[in-house]
Image (cartoon, rainbow, N blue to C red):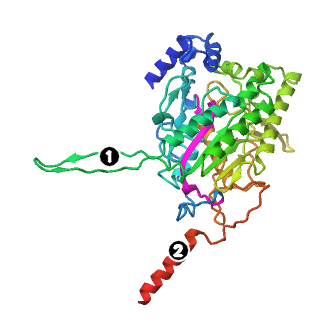
Amino acid sequence: MGWLCVAVATCALVSRCVKGDNWWWKYEEGIRHYSKEALNKEFPEKIRPVGFKHPAFQCPDMSPSLSTPSSVEFVKAGDIKVVAALGDSLTTAIGANATTVLGIPIEFRHVSWSIGGFGSYEDVITLPNIIKLFNPRVLGAAQGKTIHGMEAHLGQTGLNLAVTGQNTFNLPGQTRHLIDTLRSYEVKRYSFSKVMGQNKFIFLNLCIDKGLNFEKDWKLLTILMGMNDICDYCKDKALFSADNFMHYMAVSLEMLMNEVPRMIVNVVQILPMQTLREVQKPTPGCLLQRSFCSCLIEPVSRSAELRELVEINLEFQRKLESLLLTDRFFRDDFAVVLQPFLKQADPPRLPVIHDVTTSSRFSSLTFHLSEQSGKIDMSFFTHDCFHFTIKGHEELAKGLWNNMFQPEGRKTVVSSFSDPITLVCPPTDHPYIFTRPPSARSDQSPSTPSTAVVYILSAIVAFGLRAFL
C-alpha cells in the first residue's frame, strides 16, 4: 500500500500523470487547499476489515449446461466463460478501499461490483465472484489495483476496460478496445521441449490452450455509463445531451452486435443523481464532490438550473428504455438487456430510531427521533462523498445479479440501499439469464428437447441396451 500512496502523491505533485487528463485536474483543484494533516487523515471505517467473510451462497442447481448452448435464451450462469466491463469511475472502483483522501485516485478494480475478481465470494461480493460459484474457471475478472492515468496491464485490469472520468462519447473507443482485446485473448499455444537423462533427449511438444474461444465461448459484458454526462451537462449542453447519450450508446452496441458472437450485454440504468446532493459531511474529502460533479452540486435548491438537470437525468433514463426495450439488439447468439435496479435508487440511510418514553399518569407516549435517523449512511461512500466503498459495490453486484434472473416486467427496482439486498438463485423452472426483449416473440421453449436432452436420452437407451445384452 505504501508504494501506491507514493505514486498517488507523485501524480498529484507533477501536474498530471497524463497531460490533459481532466479527472486529475478536478482532483488537484479539490485538494489544493487541504492541509497535510487532512490529506493523510485515516478513515479505517471506510475499508473492508481484515479477515471479514461472507457466509456461503448455495443454489439448488449450480451446474453449467451439459453442452454449450447455441441460443442466447438458454445460457446459465455456469455457461459464462468470460466477463468484461466498460464504464467510468464507478466501474474502475476508484477510492473504493482507500483509507485517506490521497488514496482516492487508486482504482480498486479487483473489488468493482461488475468485474472485480479479488479472492472469492466470501471475501467480496462481485458479479464475477458470484459467477465463479457456478463456473470457477471464468475469465476476465480484474485481479489488481491501478492508479488513474498510469499505465496498467491486463494482469491488473483483466477485462475491466472502464476509464475513470470518461463520458458516453468515449464509449465507442472503449468498445473497440474491448473487441480487439477479446480477439487477442482467443487461443495462445505454447510449445516447449524437455531434456531428460544424460544421453536421452525426450522432446515434449505440448500445446496448452489458454484463454477464450472467441467464436464459441459465451461472454458477459456489463456497461454503466452516463453519470459523468450529467455532471458535465451545464458545461456543454449540446455535447452532453440525451440524444448524444443515446447515439454513442447505440453506436457501441452496434459494434458489439456486428463483431462479437455469443455475448450478453447488461446495460445498467443510470442513477437518479439529485439525492447525491445530500451526501455531505464536514470533512475535506467531501469538497471533492463539487470538483467532480459541479453541475449537480453547485445549483441552489429549487433553482431552474437544478430542475433542468433533474429533467435531463430522467430523459437519459427514458432514452435508454426506448433504445433497449426493443428487439434491435437481439439475435440468436447476442442480446442487450436493460437492467433497471438503479432506476429509482435512493442513497442508503441510517435507520430511524425512536426513543420511547411515557409521561403522566395517563401513560401518554413521547417519541424522540435519534439525531442520526434518516441521514445518509456515509459508510457506503468514499472520502470524496461521491463514489462507493466496497460496501456500496457489493449492493450493486447483488442488484445486478438479481435483475439478470428476473424477466422483463418483473425486474426488481431498488428504492433504497438502506436494507441489504438478498441474493436470489436462478429459478429452477428457468435457470437461464433472461435475455428476450418484450417486443420479441419466442419460437423456442425451455421445454423443447435440446441437444443436451437428446444426448441424455441416447445415453440412457445405450446403457439399457448394454445391460440387456
Q: 181 or 120, which is in the foreground?
A: 181
Q: What stretch is highlighted in magenta?
A: 73-94
Q: Which mark is residue 191?
A: 1
N-terminal-most mark, 1 or 2: 1
Residue closest to the eye, 306 or 189: 189
Q: Which amino acid does label 1 sit on?
A: Ser
Q: Residue furthest bottom?
A: 468
Q: Using the image, tell me which numbered label, if any, was put on residue 120.
A: none
Circle 2 crowding by C-alpha within 10 Å: few under 14, some 14–19, many from 20: few
Instruction: Decide if residue 420 is in sight here.
Output: no
Crowding around mark 1 (Cα neighbors within 10 Å: few <14, some 14 to 19, many 20+) is few
Circle 1 SS class: loop
In the displayed structure, 97 sits above or below 262; it is above
Q: Position of residue 393 (x, y in %)?
A: 61, 38
Residue 378 in percent (x, y) is at 66, 31
- Location of residue 312 by image quarter: top right
Relative to the observer, which residue lies in front, 183 or 335? Answer: 183
Snapshot quadrant of residue 454: bottom right
Q: Which residue is drawn at 63% across and 54% down?
A: 333
Quadrant for the C terminus, please. bottom left
* Residue 324 in sight in this render: yes
Left/right of residue 244 with respect to residue 161 in the rendered view: right
User: Which residue has dot 2 on it?
Assistant: 456
The image shows residue 287 at horizontal and vertical percentages of 68, 18
Q: Is mark 1 in CB contact (under 8 Å) with mark 2?
A: no
Give the left or right position of residue 153, taking residue 370 as reference: left
User: In the rendered view, would you say 376 is above or below 420?
Assistant: above
Gap in angstroms between the C-alphas marked 1 and 2: 37 Å
Q: Can residue 79 be found in the magenta stretch? A: yes
Residue 235, given in percent of the width and then of the height, sits at 77, 19
Residue type at mark 2 is: Ile
Q: Is residue 79 above or below residue 42?
A: below
